[in-house]
Image: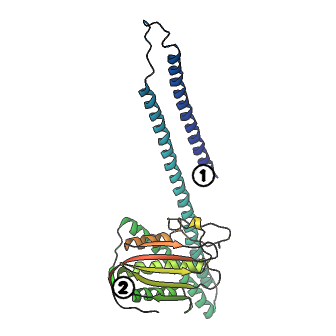
Amino acid sequence: MRKRNSLAHDLAIFILAQIVWLALLGLWIYWYISNYLIFEKVGEKVSPQIVINTPNVFPFVGGIVLLVGLSFSMVLIFRHLNVQINLTRLYDNFIANITHELKSPLSSIQLYLETLNSRNVPAEKQKEFIDQMLRDTARLQKLISTILEISALESRKNKANFEVYDSCEILDRLIKESAEQFRLKDNAINFQCINSAKIFIDVNAFKMVFDNLIDNSIKYTTGEPKIIVSVNTFFNKVEIYFKDYGIGIPPNEQKNIFQKFYRIYDKDIPNVKGTGLGLYLVKEIIRNHKGKISVKSEGKGKGTTFIIELPIIKRTTKSKKL
């Protein structure tokens, strides 16, 4: 509530400042025109001994330019202020989300440990508790790794390990590893690759790309996820199409989903917790590979397609469908 009041206060100041500048500009124009009209009406009737200075157009034009410049400066200041307010709001949302993401698995682990410490838990139940704690630990590890990876990418301090790979073979391997990590069924992901090419990638970083895309597909799909990944080579690039059949993305949200801390809030979208860093990390990794990523979705309930473009090193004649 305080932030909304602050924004309204800043907006009121900006509008008031613009009114003042416009009023001053109007007075300036009125003064010039009044003097000009007076001179036009009485200038020739006045005695020649009386010197009347004709209104000079240069101060008038200079005054208008100055006032317009001041008004434009106010617009820039307000725009900068608005950007800072939005960044602060996104940062606050990030803090709230990441606090929940950290607290939830920690509370779960603590509860299981206290139960194991205070009670005689049957062996089968102990195994169930341990499995859940391992999943919570992996969730925390993923969150920490994401934050550290983003920090390293932004500071250009990440130790990338780029090597040359066959696009069909390496992407097929990474997709299978991610599917196994999320315990997806064998037919959950349909992988197709045509016209294989040589690509220069960091395997560990690119694994995080598929991890985040698959994780998003699972979160935003009602029922069992179904994913199609198709890879093809066109001229000097490899294109990867990652399509799911989830709830889709509204057109007005598609340009924002790769922003840091950005999350979609909609009453028809499942209440999925997150930090708003997953797709931002994906974009940064792809950019670090000299590639591009974009998104297409026809709207709610019509699925989402991510298109990744990577530069190739050398095209081969190998072609296969997996």
In percent of width and height, residue 24 lies at: 54, 30
In percent of width and height, residue 16 lies at: 58, 38
- Among numbered discs 1 and 2, the one appearing first in the sequence: 1
Q: On the rendered structure, is 91 left or right of 161?
A: right
Is residue 192 at least partly visible in the picture?
yes
Identified at 47% across, 86% down, the residue is 175
Q: On the rendered structure, is 94 left or right of 52?
A: right
Dividing the picture into quarters, in which one does residue 206 lie? bottom left
Q: Is residue 149 above or below residue 134?
A: above
Other-residue count near label 2 (Cα within 10 Å), few / some / many at <14 / 14–19 / ≥20:
many
In percent of width and height, residue 281 lies at: 46, 71
Picture disc at residue 197: 2
Going by the numbered disc 1, the residue's amino acid type is: Lys
Among all residues in the image, which is located at the extreme right?
267
Dot in front, 1 or 2: 2
Is residue 137 at least partly visible in the picture?
no
Give the spatial CA distance, label 1 vs label 2: 52 Å
Going by the numbered disc 2, the residue's amino acid type is: Ala
- For this rendering, which residue is in front, 232 or 229? 232
In percent of width and height, residue 122 lies at: 63, 92
- For this rendering, which residue is in front, 61 or 255? 61
Q: On the rendered structure, is 222 left or right of 184?
A: right
Coloring scheme used: rainbow
Picture disc at residue 140: none
Dividing the picture into quarters, in which one does residue 102 lie? bottom right
- For this rendering, which residue is in front, 101 or 165? 165
Q: Is residue 171 above or below residue 25?
A: below
In the picture of the structure, the residue carrying the numbered disc 1 is: 3
Element type at marker 1?
Answer: helix
Q: Is residue 83 above or below residue 110?
A: above
Dividing the picture into quarters, in which one does residue 55 lie? top left
Identified at 43% across, 88% down, the residue is 194
